[in-house]
Image: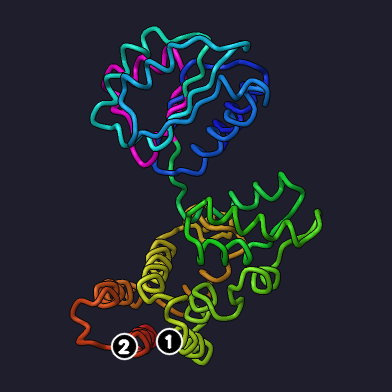
Amino acid sequence: MEDFKRIVDEIKQGRLKPIYFLMGEEPYYIDKISEYIEDNVLDESEKGFNQMVLYGRDVTIDDIVSNAKRFPMMAENQVIIIKEAQALSRSIEQLVAYANNPQPTTVLVINYKYKKLDKRKALYKQIVKTGLVFESKKLYENQVPDWIRRVLAGKDYKIVPKAAQMLVEFLGNDLSKIENELNKLQIILPKGTQITADHIEENIGISKDFNNFELRKAIGEKNKIKAYQIAKYFADNPKDNPLVLTVALLFNFFSQLLHYHGLSDKSSRSVASSLGINPYFVNEYITAGKNYPMKKVSRVVSALRDYDVKSKGVGANAMSQKDLLNEMLFIIFE
């Protein structure tokens, strides 16, 4: 996020690079930088003759170079944006000749999503010298709540940890999808609002009481009644609550709990830092640690590996999601 801000600030100051090579697994920041250049480098009156969007599946490297070498018309710069450039992965190294001597009045933006240049090869090394390479890395799910908090803070909103966790649980680490939902909330809620679990439930449709976050909490507290209530809700709404996701989240929880048992320093600060969790959730791990000794946690982790396979339809003997989930809870609680 800091690199993204720096790049945008440089563009605002008119410090343009002749080549922006935007690559990596996370498309969110690639799109944001590309869209910012598309919207802001040229005036509206200049865009008609001097801004062009091409698609990797429809062009060759020679086409890109030919367009990039043109001179702008009645403007200081021209902007050439190549979307879906990953379609050119087999021939992308041919761009090195242009990268050696790029047209100074052209801003060439290459969106190379889900792939990366080989940093050992000439093209990467040359663009680093004459232009800019930006690698957009996927955030781990435990990093996304803090990303949500920072995005909202920049727009004068706050969010409680549970509400952020609900979004991550429902949408994973897909930043574009999360941003779409946050934008909906910002339309509905006035600036200065602290977004709560109730706001998420009412406006996005994620249940604040029947979700994997609450199931994890119920299991940690050994609240069997609540856990089986949530399991029933999941079984009645399987499309919104796939078993494979539930198993993965519980596996992660018990794996972290195993790590927790191995900590010599179990202070709240140490637990939050060591497990990579928000301090708000530390008490859940302390409670679960009391209810599940290390040997039990090890057995649960082993069992969850089996249920991960079964949730994908292997060796489950045609058991329903309801039966698999109830059986899994029985194993955890026994």
Q: Quadrant of the N terminus?
A: top right
Q: How many marks?
A: 2
Instruction: Give the image quarter of residue 321.
Output: bottom left
- Of pointers 2 and 1, the one earlier in the residue sequence: 1
Callout 2, which amino acid? Ser
Q: Does the segment drawn in magenta span residue 118?
A: yes
The stretch of residues the image draws in magenta is: 109-135
The tag on residue 235 is 1
* Image position of 90 (left or right of 230): left
Residue 244 in the image: x percent, y percent?
Answer: 35, 72
Percent position (x, y) of residue 5? 61, 32
Placement of the C terminus among the 4 image quadrants:
bottom left
Q: Amino acid under label 1?
A: Ala
Q: Please give the residue where the numbered disc 2 appears in the rendered image.
A: 320
- Report the residue at 64% width, 56% height from top: 182
Labels 2 & 1 near each other (Cβ < 8 A): yes
Q: Position of residue 163 (x, y in %)?
A: 63, 65
Verify whether residue 238 appears in magenta.
no
Say which mark, if any, is on residue 151: none
- In the rendered image, the vertical position of residue 231 relative to residue 83, given as above or below: below
